[in-house]
Structure formats: C-alpha cells, structure tokens
Image (cartoon, rainbow, N blue to C red):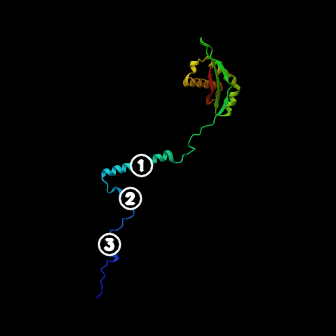
Amino acid sequence: MAKVSTAPSDLEADEGQAAPPPKRGIVGRLLGIFTGLSKKQMMIYGGGLLLAIGLGFGAMTMFGGKTDMAAAPAVPKGVYHDLPEMVVNLSATNERPQYLRVKITIEVDNDEIVRALKPVLPRVIDTFQVHLRELRAVDLEGSAGLFRLREELMRRVNHSIAPAKIRAVLFKEIVVQ
C-alpha cells in the first residue's frame, strides 16, 4: 500500500498561517500606532506630536537654518574726526566759577564730509563755545542732559555744513570743574 503522507504540503502551510503584514510607509506606521487607542488618547498624542513638530520647526528657523548675510543690512563704517579740546566757563552763578572741559569726536559717513567740515571748522568751534558758555552745571547732569547737549551740537554742525550731514557727535571726555 502506498504510504500517504500526513505532513501538510507547503501550499497548505501557507494557507493556514496568517499572511505577513504588508510593508507600510511612515504614515501607515503612524496610523497603525493610533489604531488601538481611545479617542482621548489619540487627541493627547496627536496634540503632543503637533506641538513637537511646531517647536522643532520654530527652533530650526530661529537657531538652525542658514542665514542670508546679503539680506542683513550692513552697518556702514564711519569716519571719525577729532575736534580740539575746548575749555569754557559755564554760565555764572553767585558761587565760584565753574569750567567745562570737553573733547569731541564727530562721526561722518565718508571723507567728503570731513573735507566739507574742515573749511568751516572755526565756525563750528565758535558755535560750540557760544552754546557751551550758556549752559549751567545742572544742564549737564544725567544722561538726559548729555543727550540734549549732543543733539544741540549735532544740529549746529549740520547747520554749518549743510547740505552735508554728520552721523553723530561723540564725547571723548566731559569734565565739569
């Protein structure tokens, strides 16, 4: 008699076992993770995932990515011109006389403005001294007093060299005695 094999054939073995899951992409895998969760859990995990993506994107744009140096405004380099030291007596009070010693540097955009400034420099120094003699010691107190003085001196220089303009008046030294 012929021996009948009771072992299942290869075809029968494949039919009885579950087929391996099909290969899925990233989206399919993510959706597979969420299939066994309740709605509340899916909302919590989904919100956390969106928050992580948003924070990652924000950090990348703020700290990471390439910065375009051409788009950043270039700070133009200034040219500095020192004025001679000035000593003036301040507006008199009933007390002892007070003196102001000041060293000023003028910041300009280019050498052309310095060339425009040099012929009128005696006029600029004269207007500075006239203005400084009218000041009192209390006018120079605090940063607000120095700011007002800087703005007034800058206005006087710009008026003298118009249409050219200076960028700033810089104080190297201010001493009230």
On the image, numbered disc 1 is attached to which residue? 52
Q: Which residue type does callout 2 highlight?
A: Arg
Are the residues flagged by discs 3 and 2 in contact, CB closer than 8 Å? no
Q: Earlier in the sequence, mark 3 or mark 1?
A: 3
Instruction: Tell me the kind of residue under disc 3.
Output: Glu
Q: Position of residue 164 (x, y in %)?
A: 64, 29
The extreme top residue here reads 94
Count of labels shown?
Answer: 3
Which disc number belongs to residue 159?
none
Q: Image height check: is 156 above or below 14? A: above
* SS under mark 2: helix
- Is 73 located above or below residue 125 in the figure? below
Query: Tag 2 or tag 3, which sits nearer the N-term?
Result: 3
**Which image quadrant: the N terminus?**
bottom left
Which image quadrant for residue 70? top right
Where residue 151 sits in the image (x, y, percent)?
58, 25
Q: Which mark is residue 29?
A: 2
SS category of the residue bearing label 1? helix
Element type at mark 3: helix
The numbered mark at residue 15 is 3
Quarter holding residue 172: top right
Label 2 vs label 1: CA separation? 18 Å
